[in-house]
Image (cartoon, rainbow, N blue to C red):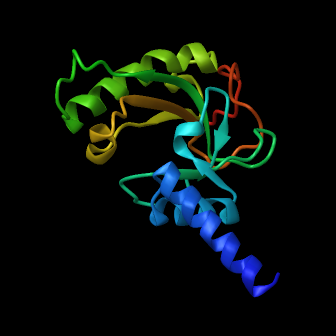
Amino acid sequence: MTRHAIAATALAAATVIALTGCSIGAISQSITNAVEGKEDVFSIEVGDCFNDDTGAVEEISSVKMPECTEEHDNEAYYIYDVSDDDFPSYDAAAIEEDAEYGCFSQFEQFVGASVEETSLHYSYFYPSAASWEQGDREILCLAYDLDGPISEPLGGKGPNYPYEG
């Protein structure tokens, strides 16, 4: 590119950023996610498989999403929103309790076995205080194998799924 073309491209990019209201930080995060092969956590749908290689992170914004036939940590099996009527303000403990009950109540229907009958278990993502302020009310229920990564979809595995109890 010529110097003039590079300057014109930079001006066009700055104009797009200004018009879309995106911050440099958000764009930088999007570029980082693309390079690392990650997708926005809000893009996860029921049946999607993903890795949560986040360690002890309190707020997750992006995850790697391999195909369910590739090695992965989790599979999304139920997604719902908590109600502003039930939670007029952010209460992490109450929202986590709701997520615990909501995800537990759907686990057996998804897997085809209770938690006690399989090596599969469940967990969930729920809104952080910061995402709550931005309107996030989503609870994401996820199934995983207590024994480690899996390379197949988990729906309907039933009590015969590797259970060594």
Measured as percent of width and height from the top left, residue 117 is found at 56, 23
Identify which residue is drawn at 63% across, 36% down.
Answer: 164
Q: Quadrant of the C terminus?
A: top right
Instruction: Please count the marks in the image.
Output: 0
Measured as percent of width and height from the top left, residue 43 is found at 59, 38
* Side of 13 relative to 132 (left or right): right
Front residue (pair 76, 136): 136
Front residue (pair 129, 149): 129
Q: Can the viewer see residue 54?
A: no
Residue lying at the far front in this picture: please name it.
Answer: 4
Measured as percent of width and height from the top left, residue 153 is found at 74, 31
Q: Would you identify the image quadrant in which residue 103 lies? A: top left
Identify which residue is drawn at 79% across, 46% down.
Answer: 70
Front residue (pair 34, 123): 34
Identify which residue is drawn at 80% across, 84% down.
Answer: 2
Q: Can the viewer see residue 104?
A: yes
Q: Is residue 57 above or below residue 47?
A: below
Measured as percent of width and height from the top left, residue 35 is found at 69, 65
Front residue (pair 44, 103): 44
Q: Is residue 102 above or below residue 137?
A: above
